[in-house]
């Protein structure tokens, strides 16, 4: 189980404080709901911990030494996989998209094909394997993006408002997929402005308000 | 009017008669301009990418510089290169004046800012999530760079075609640093200029037809690329 501690995360944009001295400790068995109003900095926070956005200040403690951003971002990118609110699918088929990250893991073609098949089964979209990514619905795109992240087996998957613009049926399917990820011990942080997701058993809630983070543990 | 129609008639006959001199000029033109594009495009695209994806001091100045450099007249490039490459110039020892290499250098100077500016416009307007997605899925930044280029391939191809269109038709620089030497540095635009000054219009018109046809083909390719791009983003 991985534990990652980040401290003193600070970020300002246009002279406004977005994140202020945030401290967070994350375990790879965490299932975290992150709440906060629109514009409270949830996506920004996720992009920072995914190593995609450089904060003004931060402290990542690793082997008792403080890391520079150049080192820290490489470390963070190994652990976290970030999914945009509206996922970006590369031009190509669903199969090509799911195989994207696997190409960088030194796997054989057969192994990649096998893992892609497993991922398609997880999201129940086997019948769309050869469909072009641009021809998918919003819900299907979200599921393909989750499968694409799952298949590379990161320690954490960061889901940024995955249920925004989703109908009830797609939402139900996505809940099932997220619960499946959880069973495979992938840490999850899911942002939402809506705190009610009855089908998901979070163990922790992080709430972002005026740049400050508060924590609440569920039973 | 009769002169024009008879010259055009002769030009068409000349084109279909497989006149070796005419086709040598055409091939030389394409060879020089293609080499200029092949040398310029990789670096221009890398610069455009850096300008689009990284923030650094002087970035806006560089963007303005490339935008301004797009408008440099070919004859000014020719004059500057001439002064640099002439025997008494600082690069005179390389003996490049009146060679194809000098023509290529001139065309590189002309197409480079255009390639950077058009590639920058393409990459800057592209969805930045492509880069982030590639990175977060474990791609090394160099691989992520190639992924972004693949996603932007239609716009980048259009930029390359537009730059090629500009340099294959330029006369000022090629004339000054190439010298318009038959079998060696005579390309389509310099040959047209020469034949026109001699009053021998048929070869000039034949070469003009080739340039027009090429412009038509390039525009058709550009339209096709644009249509495919729009289809992709529907």
Image (cartoon, grey):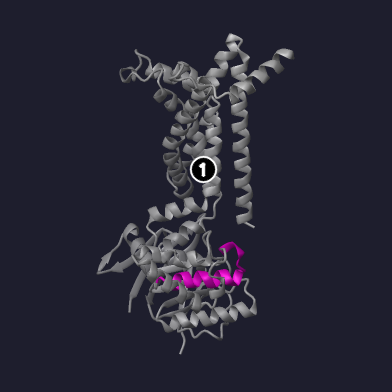
Q: Does the magenta stretch include residue A136?
A: yes
Check the image and report above or below for A74 versus B35.
below
Extent of the magenta region: A133-152
Neighbour tally class for label 1: few under 14, some 14-19, many 20 plus, Cα within 10 Å: many
Front residue of A76 and B75: B75
| Numbered label tally | 1
Determine the image quadrant of residue A86: bottom right
Q: Does the magenta stretch include residue A60?
A: no
Check the image and report above or below for A43 versus B79.
below
Q: What residue is pinned by disc 1? A: B119
Is residue A98 found left or right of B6 in the rendered image? Answer: left
Residue B49 at least partly seen? yes
Residue reaching furthest bottom? A219
Residue A52 at least partly seen? no
From the image, which quarter does the C terminus of chain A lie in? Answer: bottom left
Front residue of B3 and B106: B3
* Residue in the image at 38% along x and 76% along y: A26
- In x, y percent, where is residue B32? 45, 28
């Amino acid at each position: 189980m991985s534990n990652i501690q980040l401290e003193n995360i600070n970020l300002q944009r246009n002279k406004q404080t977005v994140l202020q001295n945030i401290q967070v400790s994350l375990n790879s068995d965490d299932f975290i709901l992150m709440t906060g109003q629109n514009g409270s900095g949830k996506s920004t926070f996720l992009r920072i911990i995914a190593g995609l956005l450089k904060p003004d200040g931060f402290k990542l403690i690793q082997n008792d030494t403080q890391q520079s951003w150049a080192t820290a971002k490489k470390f963070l990118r190994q652990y976290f996989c970030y999914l945009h609110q509206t996922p970006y699918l590369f031009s190509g088929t669903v199969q090509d998209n799911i195989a994207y990250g696997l190409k960088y893991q030194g796997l054989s073609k057969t192994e990649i094909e096998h893992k892609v098949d497993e991922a398609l089964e997880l999201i129940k979209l086997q019948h769309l394997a050869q469909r072009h990514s641009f021809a998918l619905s919003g819900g299907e795109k979200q599921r393909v993006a989750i499968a694409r992240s799952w298949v590379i087996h990161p320690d954490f998957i960061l889901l940024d408002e995955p249920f925004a613009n989703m109908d009830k049926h797609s939402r139900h399917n996505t809940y099932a997929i997220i619960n499946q990820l959880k069973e495979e011990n992938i840490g999850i942080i899911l942002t939402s402005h809506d705190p009610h997701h009855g089908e998901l058993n979070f163990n922790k809630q992080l709430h972002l308000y005026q740049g400050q983070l508060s924590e609440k543990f569920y039973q | 009017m009769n002169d024009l129609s008879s010259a055009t008639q002769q030009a068409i006959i000349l084109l279909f008669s497989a006149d070796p001199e005419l086709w040598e000029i055409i091939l030389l033109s394409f060879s020089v301009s293609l080499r200029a594009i092949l040398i310029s495009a990789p670096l221009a695209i890398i610069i455009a990418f850096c300008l689009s994806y990284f923030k650094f001091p002087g970035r806006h100045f560089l963007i303005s510089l490339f935008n301004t450099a797009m408008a440099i007249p070919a004859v000014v490039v020719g004059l500057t290169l001439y002064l640099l490459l002439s025997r008494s110039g600082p690069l005179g020892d390389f003996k490049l004046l009146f060679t194809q290499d000098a023509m290529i250098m001139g065309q590189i100077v002309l197409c480079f800012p255009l390639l950077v500016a058009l590639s920058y416009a393409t990459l800057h307007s592209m969805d930045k999530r492509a880069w982030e997605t590639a990175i977060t899925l474990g791609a090394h930044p160099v691989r992520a760079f190639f992924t972004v280029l693949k996603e932007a391939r239609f716009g980048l191809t259009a930029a390359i075609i537009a730059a090629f269109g500009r340099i294959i038709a330029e006369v000022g620089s090629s004339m000054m640093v190439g010298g318009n030497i038959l079998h060696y540095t005579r390309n389509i635009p310099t040959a047209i200029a020469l034949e026109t000054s001699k009053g021998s219009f048929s070869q000039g018109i034949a070469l003009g037809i080739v340039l027009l046809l090429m412009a038509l083909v390039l525009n058709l390719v550009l339209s096709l690329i644009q249509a495919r791009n729009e289809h992709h983003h529907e």
